[in-house]
Image (cartoon, rainbow, N blue to C red):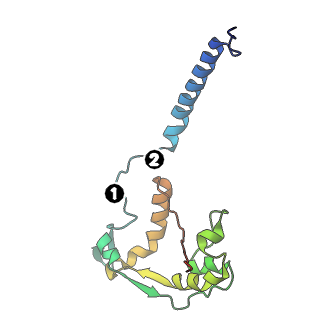
Amino acid sequence: MSTSRPSFPRNLCIRLSTFSALSVVLFYLIVQPASTPEPFSEPFHHGLEEETVTNGVSSKCSPRDWSAGTWKRKENPVVVVKPDDVYAASGFKGCASNREMPWHLSNGNPQEFAWRGNVSAYDWVPSAVCDDMRDHFEESLVVDLVERGGWLLIGVFFFVSKK
């Protein structure tokens, strides 16, 4: 029996492994700190519980006040008759993703258009304490999600079981 010598020299293998490990560590040290969000300097609250002033009266909008609201039907809801109507019905100007939009927005199947229109025909109206919070809520939510490292995933799951 003959013992065959490895086709790849051991010394070269050790050098390449060391170089690869150092490259990964260096890459991590250079790139990672720039993408790591700063620790929160204040609670993550999307503008809730901030002091608001309405007609000279100071108030706070707590999560409990926000959740004490009701669903209110829109005065003129958009009727969904074609896939692109889902954007207007949902209050979207477009979609940030170009992948699987019909599945995520439930606008790929004409049988789901009526359902999607009914779901999108309602708005959340918080309690009166939070009335003036609504104007800047959306903007502060996006800032928190993008700049503080969170992400909002919007998806609609619609399952139909047939027996």
For residue 160, the mark is none
Residues at circles 1 and 2 in contact by the CB criterion of under 8 Å: no
Give the residue at x 46% y 64%. 141
SS for dot 2: loop
Looking at the rendered structure, the kind of residue marked 2 is: Pro
Point out residue 4 in the picture as x, y percentages from the top left corner: 70, 11
Residue at the top extreme? Answer: 2
User: Which of the two residues, 158 or 106, is positioned nearer the viewer here?
Assistant: 158
Instruction: Name the quadrant of the C terminus.
Output: bottom right
Point out residue 19 in the picture as x, y percentages from the top left corner: 60, 21
Give the residue at x 49% y 38%. 33
Looking at the rendered structure, the kind of residue marked 1 is: Pro
User: Nearer the N terminus, badge 1 or badge 2?
Assistant: 2
User: Which of the two residues, 52 or 127, is positioned nearer the viewer here?
Assistant: 127
Horizontally, residue 103 falls left or right of residue 70, namely right
Give the residue at x 63% y 68%. 95
Give the residue at x 63% y 85%. 80
For residue 43, the mark is 1
SS for dot 1: loop
User: Toward which corner of the image does residue 31 lie, by quadrant?
Assistant: top right
Count of residue discs: 2
Provide the residue designation for mark 2.
Answer: 37
Instruction: Name the quadrant of the N terminus.
Output: top right
User: Toward which corner of the image does residue 47 lie, by quadrant?
Assistant: bottom left
Q: Residues within 10 Å of mark 2 (few under 14, many from 20)?
A: few
Residue at the bottom extreme? Answer: 75
In this view, 143 is above or below 83:
above
Q: Residues within 10 Å of mark 1 (few under 14, many from 20)?
A: few
